[in-house]
Image (cartoon, helix red, strand yellow):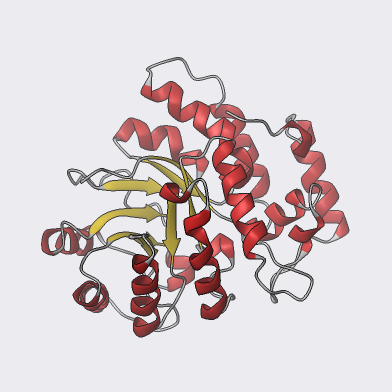
């Protein structure tokens, strides 16, 4: 099985003025992000407001993905708590050619490794021919994957459990499984992760740092001296001072007003925060008009 490797963005969802999902603009943004350097895009991760967007709208977008020029580079995040909704969304995606999924354990309830194993086992029982990237983000789900749980899942489902996005950062330094993708959730972990044997990253800020992150990745794979990693980490550090979704939409709204639209309780940055964000980015020579292809 081909391993998932490279620079992936947790894609932004673009909304219209009525806060409905703008499928065309969301796909166009994903395509542009790939053109800027990403190897692929994950739709409906946490950065894509996944828990706030309706299942109906997600299905509408998924049904339009086969027409994209980058359709082979897409991963579907389910962003759902319901076991049944996860299974149904996966079946719909598979019926039109998409079999790679980012799936987080359900939020809100308290549980442990045994319950998580049961959750994914039931999904795979219903959707056998799939590739699942586990989403490890304790701040959102309330659960943090253990090494033991992942080893057990991979041992039992080696053809389905193919990787993990590690946004809790308790896995990427020590988790070693053959032909299994470990992908930290921050650019600040990219170079260190690659040096430790990780496969790449899946992050929010690669929506805007795609070309720089790709440069770091490519120079590592070619064993060349790094020239861009410091700047990549500095940009990430600036965005981390704010809510990442709010900061990214505020930054992108300089290019397109549609990015100002966010589903409550999310909102773009207030005036002072916006000025601070853009000033801090300008101070490290990173501005919207300087985004360029890799």
Above or below for 179 versus 52:
above
Disc tally is 0
Query: Where does the image place residue 215, in percent across and percent down from the top left?
Result: 52, 26
Task: Tell me if 94 is positioned left or right of 284 in this view.
Answer: left
In the displayed image of the protein, which residue is found farthest to the left? 155
Above or below for 51 versus 219:
below
- The one nearer the camera, 292 or 244, is 292
Q: Could you say which quadrant of the image residue 36 lies in? A: top right
- The one nearer the camera, 59 or 165, is 59
Image quarter hosting the C terminus: top right
The reply to whether residue 73 is in sight is yes
Query: Where does the image place residue 271, in percent across and percent down from the top left?
Result: 87, 57
Task: Tell me if 277 is positioned left or right of 222 in this view.
Answer: right
In the displayed image of the protein, which residue is found farthest to the front? 67
Query: Where does the image place residue 141, in percent across and percent down from the top left?
Result: 43, 72
Residue drawn at the location 45% of the way across and 37% of the way down: 190
Above or below for 39 versus 85:
above
Residue drawn at the location 64% of the way across and 60% of the way down: 24
- The one nearer the camera, 181 or 188, is 181
The reply to whether residue 167 is in sight is no
Above or below for 289 versus 52:
above
Residue drawn at the location 50% of the way across and 62% of the way down: 45
Query: Where does the image place residue 85, in percent across and percent down from the top left?
Result: 40, 81
């Amino acid at each position: 099985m081909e391993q998932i490797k490279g620079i992936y963005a947790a894609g932004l969802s673009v909304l219209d003025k009525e806060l409905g999902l703008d499928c065309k603009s969301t796909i166009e943004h994903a395509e542009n992000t790939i053109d800027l350097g990403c190897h692929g895009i994950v739709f409906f991760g946490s950065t894509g407001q996944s828990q706030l967007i309706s299942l109906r709208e997600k299905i509408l977008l998924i049904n339009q993905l086969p027409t994209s020029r980058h359709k082979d580079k897409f991963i579907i995040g389910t962003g759902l708590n319901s076991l049944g909704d996860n299974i149904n969304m996966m079946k719909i995606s598979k019926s039109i050619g998409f079999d790679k999924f980012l799936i987080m354990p359900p939020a809100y309830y308290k549980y442990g490794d045994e319950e998580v194993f049961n959750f994914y086992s039931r999904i795979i029982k219903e959707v056998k021919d799939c590739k699942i990237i586990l989403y490890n983000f304790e701040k959102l789900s309330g659960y943090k994957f253990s090494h033991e749980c992942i080893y057990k899942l991979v041992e039992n489902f080696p053809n389905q459990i193919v990787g993990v996005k590690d946004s809790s950062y308790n896995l990427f330094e020590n988790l070693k499984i053959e032909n299994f993708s470990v992908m930290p959730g921050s650019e600040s972990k990219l170079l260190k992760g690659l040096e430790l044997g990780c496969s790449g990253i899946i992050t929010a800020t690669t929506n805007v740092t795609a070309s720089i992150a790709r440069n770091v990745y490519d120079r590592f794979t070619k064993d060349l001296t790094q020239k861009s990693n410091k700047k990549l980490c500095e940009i990430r550090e600036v965005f981390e001072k704010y809510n990442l979704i709010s900061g990214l939409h505020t930054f992108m709204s300089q290019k397109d007003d549609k990015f100002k639209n966010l589903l409550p309780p999310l909102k773009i940055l207030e005036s002072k925060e916006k000025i601070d964000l853009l000033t801090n980015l300008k101070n490290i020579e990173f501005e919207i008009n300087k985004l360029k292809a890799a």
